[in-house]
Amino acid sequence: MGKCIICGASVDGRICSSHEEDVVFEFRGNDPNQLKPNRFYGGIVDGYADFGVFIDLSSNVTGLLHRSELDRRIESLDWEPGDEVFVQVKNVRDNGNVDLAWSIRQEEREFRGVLVQDGTQEVDPEDGDEEDDDGDDGSAVTHKPTPDHPRDDGGSASDDSEAAADDEAGNGSTDDETDESGAEEAAGEDRSEPSDAGSDEDDDIEALRERKQSTPNGEGERVDIGSLSDRVGETVRIEGEVVGARQTGGPTVFELRDETGVVDCAAFVQAGVRAYPEIEVGDIVRLEGDVEVRRNEIQVETEALAALEGNESAAVERRLAEALSDEARPEGVAALGDHPAIDTVGDDLLEAAESIRRAVIESRPIVVRHAATADGYVAGAAVERAVLPLVREEHAKSDAEYHYFTRRPIDEPVYDMDAATKDTTRMLQDRDRHGEQLPLVLLLGTGSTVESEDGLDLLGVYDAERVVVDAATADAEIADTVATLVNPGLAGAETDDLTTGALASVLAATVNDDVIDDLAHLPAVSYWEETPETYADLATDAGVDDERVTNLREAVALEAYYQSYQDKRELITDILFDSEGGDLAGHIAGQFREKLETELETAEANVEEREVDGRTFATLDADAYSHRFDFPSTTLLADELQRRNDRDATVLYGTDELYVRADDGVDVRAAAGDAAMAVPDAGVTAVGVRQGRIEYLAGRRDEVTDAVVDAVAGQLQ
């Protein structure tokens, strides 16, 4: 038994439960479950993410201070990586994640006491220091900012500490650690020699660089990156291509790829100082270092690194190229259903699948752009289901699947300059700030018409690879703008009963045939009506009956509308693939039907029927008789009005745009051209061929609507 350091009460430890929040603890443990909720702990700022700040509570335990827990905007925090701060532990989750809360007390003197929590035991700071002298296991946080002046004990000016990892911007955060062991060894060498107290810090940095940045001697057997998990604790030599280089608040982290995988290699000179500045992304290198496990991930602590030249470089490049070709090319197009239109684009599907697999192997990010519709989300989710396992296999980092694969839904099925500018800005930032390679941009159900040409060309200026997969309308000109265009219509096939979701599901199964069973029901989900028998049978054989297919489709359609620019990865995965997680899809589908029926009831009561040239039209002022900023979208409302009524065509018009639907199909460009001739000062333009969308000047809305109806009636004759 002991006595509480605040009130003197008898306790099992050094603090009573009534005063735990009056004391700040220095945590010297290696398991997050040793932390106690509601206690205040000292920590070190590790790095920033869009959603909060990572705080190291010990060398092995990191928590997240979410931005919602702050008493100010995250942008106004003046914390830098390496700063000492105080936080409160809110919760330790079952998976070991630690949720932190803000502490208004940011000075040790503002607490009534200080204790060391050694594992689960509370001890006085003096006792904790004595344990350190006797050989503490180093679990306390040691990556403090480097001192401004040389150490008094004659050591290096560098504190040789473990530093915080830099935030990975819009691609997910990574927490890389410093080459602590190597830095401590270097510091130990310094202590054996007297130091000039007036020496300049730059000299110390350069001296440390010389010690740390030796050249690999090339001796010893080269090992494969894929075998490193069996070599923890060993010193190894690896050869390969640098596919990423990022400077963190501590080490420089090089991503090195050989024919068997990718691994992070941390090279430390001093916190925030670029190691091996002569090494760039794309270089073929030889690296020697120690294999360690950092935060449950394999990492190599670099001892020596050098670029290879001549025959040595050529040999590695040849080895990588041969392995890449063997691994990236699928054996054949996956047999996922039997649709004749897909047979016409077999070679194109193989090319697209190889591009995706090659991007994964080369550590290039993959950015998927798809329409924010049920069909678009099914297409994107299918490719995501296939690619993520490949990313996990290729990269040791636990967050690699967020770093190397991103879905970005797009409201319009046109890849316009707005979307292209966002993608280009982000990829250039990631290249310049984090040393990333330019991504593969995969467009599903968008980007296939000339309205997307300017956006695709902008990506092309930077040689970003573009692949377009679309089952609907496509223009031949796009084939010259992108690396691969997969479109059965251009190949001469009938595509009236083929969706992009079905086509993308075949692509996904071709990329990774291990997930074919997971994808079997997706083609059926992508159809609103008249699902081809081959896909209906696939879903049934997969245990997904017609009712569940309908629920899945409607649930995805509803979620596609809300936060349409977000991928909602986890939610969409639960809806489409989690058969044991309760009837989530059925619950959301119920909301879909309720909202849609309410909107349809209002719309039908206000539809104006017209008869032109013997054809019956339903026209509706969507601005006046629909909820413009709630579900359903105008496009879905137009679809449903046309599907549910015996009319030749439906036209929904708003302030400056309208949507056309017809059972026999409409050439929207031709209709817009005819309307432009009839109302020449209205600025009539077909901007969404797939959506049947036409834009015009608001002041000529009525005249343009009449002209479009006349033009469509003429086409239906």
Image (cartoon, rainbow, N blue to C red):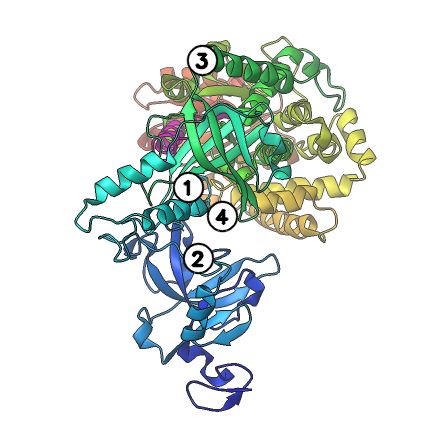
Looking at the rendered image, the disc whose residue lies closer to the viewer, 4 or 1, is 1
Task: Report the front residue among 237 and 229.
Answer: 237
Residue drawn at x 49%, y 59% as measured from the top left: 139
| Secondary structure at numbered mark 1 | loop
Q: Label 4 belongs to which residue?
A: 630
What crowding class fits label 3: few (fewer than 14 Cα within 10 Å), some (14-19), or many (20 or more)?
many
Mark before the other along the chain sequence, 1 or 3: 1
Asked if residue 10 shows in the view, the reply is yes
Report the amino acid beneath label 4: Asp
| Location of residue 515 by image quarter | top right
Looking at the rendered image, the disc whose residue lies closer to the viewer, 1 or 3, is 1
Q: Label 3 belongs to which residue?
A: 481
The reply to whether discs 3 and 2 touch (Cβ–Cβ < 8 Å) is no
**The C terminus, quarter of image:** top right
| Location of residue 269 by image quarter | top left
The reply to whether discs 1 and 3 touch (Cβ–Cβ < 8 Å) is no
| Mark 1 and mark 3: Cα distance apart in space | 31 Å
Q: Label 1 belongs to which residue?
A: 168
| Mark 3 and mark 2: Cα distance apart in space | 48 Å
Looking at the rendered image, the disc whose residue lies closer to the viewer, 3 or 2, is 2
**Residue 406 placement, left or right of 322:** left
| Secondary structure at numbered mark 4 | loop
| Mark 4 and mark 1: Cα distance apart in space | 34 Å
Mark before the other along the chain sequence, 4 or 1: 1
Q: Is 521 placed above or below 354 here?
A: below
Q: Magenta stretch containing residue 425, yes or no?
A: yes
Q: Position of residue 670 (x, y in %)?
A: 47, 15
What crowding class fits label 2: few (fewer than 14 Cα within 10 Å), some (14-19), or many (20 or more)?
many
Residue drawn at x 58%, y 10% as measured from the top left: 490
Residue range in magenta is: 420-445
